[in-house]
Image (cartoon, coloured by chain):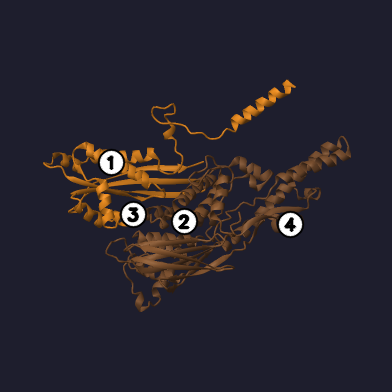
Chain colours: A brown, B orange
Amino acid sequence: MDLASGDLRGAEKKLNRLLGVESSRDLPAAYGSDTALTLLERATVLQAMGEYRLSARDFTAAEKELEFLDIANDTAGEIGKYVFSDSATKYKTSPTEKLLINAFNMINYLALGDLSGARVEARRFQVMRKYLADYFPEEPHGAFGSYLAGFVFEKSGEPEAALRHYDEVLQQVDVPELHEPIRRLAALTPFRTPRIEAVLSQPTLASHVPEPPATDEPEAEEGEILVVLKTGTVPVKQAARIPIGAAMGLAANYVSGATTLLEYGLFKVVVYPELLPHENRFTGGSLVLDGRSERLFTLTDIAQEIVAEYEKVKPKIIGAALTRMIMRAASAEAARAAGRRQSGALGFLAAALVEGTLVAMDRPDTRSWSMLPAHVHVARIPVPAGTHDLRLQLRGRSNAEIIRTVEVPPGGFAVVDVTTLR
Amino acid sequence: MMRLRLPLLLVVASLATACSGPKAVRGGPGTDRPDLDRAAMSTGLDREDLNYLFQENIDRLLASRAWQSFRMAPTRPVIAIWPIRNDTTEHIDNQLNTLLATLESRLVESGDVLVVSRERQREMAQEVGLQNTNAVYDPATVARLSKQVGAQYYLTGKIQAVDERAEGERRVQYTLTLQLIEVETSIIHFQHTSVRTKAIVR
């Protein structure tokens, strides 16, 4: 789906057609192999349109379906995957994508001012992050989700939970803007890690005297604005071809079956899904609040995380494609042997027909969450309660300006969320 | 020709039947599918679970010593009901609000206490800018607002969850805790916790 022109309504309509529904108010009646993925795409588009309630509902529905997929055997799909094609199975999200579902949904609830709903997503993020950390301890994930979860718990008056999540952020990237909230929270809880100790040991500026954390108490007049800018989209998968020899070099450890059969096959290249970078129009931005420049911090390079994650599994994917080629070659040889009993020409034709049919059915799985933003930039700005003018200049191959008027309640917060999707 | 067509039609008809899409059905008491509500669809809390969790708490509350003393009291005490804090991993705030309405009805019907309209409480929270904020769960704020609406006691609580995933399974253990607290002294006169577990297993 090309969003270069920024036609979000058009994208929404296309996605609704794919889901078989009349409008975004509707959820699909049944879930096919791509439904959960299409819902994720629609949720992302709806969030970019500022339709936060509908987006939240879509993310939740998609997540529930994907959770069942993770747990279910998906027996029929697995069989189809082995013999024919990766795309025969239902779409499953990668660890990075799993964590981003809850992170993006936290934005929906924060933008709606629904702290209770945001806490639910923060806790879901926490559960998924712990699960992934247990199985992939060497791969820290989800700095963006941890940042938002920390914010949610900080605003909910749960200092220890907030500090734990901010510490997760520090494990991946140092965000100077978090130092001040960390100092304030550390005054309320004994929770410490070497990273938090390091922040606390740094000298504070005179203007950064630790204050009690912002609460929802009416007497607290100062509020806060959280700006979240999501630019571009991640690389998408496209079918790529690689000679069998090169493929064997990359994926020999993941191939099963008699590789000698590949010599008899008609096809000498392996078709597999490859990530191709997206030409993004916007890559960052700058921020002016009430006439004063504020720093936007690039918190997460989702595109890079997706590429790194994919590169790790690519040998397995190419190996699976090679294994399917071997099975096709074996089927073709069986057909050739059966045909030869009648004539040599018939044997060749039968083999070619079987292999050709199976190749036609074998489509590489190029599905991915294509509207996932490539970069996330954040800013936290303490402000007096009241009305504020915010200007966001988008930068990249193109330039654009977004102007918002932001209302900050006394002692509360406001979230400004901008998604470019291009 | 007919011999060929008839089996073909049968195959097409059976395929059409097999491929027929989902349809809406009616279930629950008084229908031909009385057990429809009983099946668990997810690890979330459905009406069955919430009814169970609430029912047990309400039954215990009405049988408690504190409630007995209300019945014996010369004047009926005034009780305010505040939102139950959702500390779970499920979006159940709407269901909790529905059940608070049920709780309100049960207390009013008991005739043992006077209940402050939750609508009035909501208005008051709105007046002081606390609606949709976290302050409606803060004990000090709740006590202050309860006093302002003339309540001697308030009912509050929270629903929590221990949510765990392991290879191929997910289990969520829910606990609903209900508390009856005296506004002036913050003494807890009643507290009970009911539990329910939901899981997705293979």
At label 1, the amino acid type is Leu
Q: Position of residue A328 (x, y in %)?
A: 75, 44
Same chain? Circles 4 and 2? yes
- Farthest left residue in view: B74
Residue A6 vs residue A141, the one in the foreground: A6
Same chain? Circles 4 and 3? no
Q: Pointer 1: what residue?
A: B103
* Front tag of 1 and 2: 2
At label 4, the amino acid type is Ile
In terms of secondary structure, where does tag 3 sit?
A: loop
Q: Position of residue A175 (x, y in %)?
A: 46, 69
At a point 73% along the width and 58% down the height, the residue shown is A249
Badge 3: how crowded within 10 Å, few (<14), some, or many (20+)?
A: some
Q: Pointer 2: what residue?
A: A50
Q: Report the disc number at residue B132.
A: 3
How far is the residue under mark 3 from the one under mark 1?
21 Å
At label 3, the amino acid type is Asn
How far is the residue under mark 1 from the one under mark 2?
36 Å
Q: Position of residue A334 (x, y in %)?
A: 79, 40
Dot 4: chain letter = A
How far is the residue under mark 2 from the one under mark 3?
20 Å
Q: Quadrant of residue A112?
A: bottom left
Contact (CB < 8 A) between labels 1 and 4? no
Q: Position of residue A218 (x, y in %)?
A: 28, 62
At label 2, the amino acid type is Gly
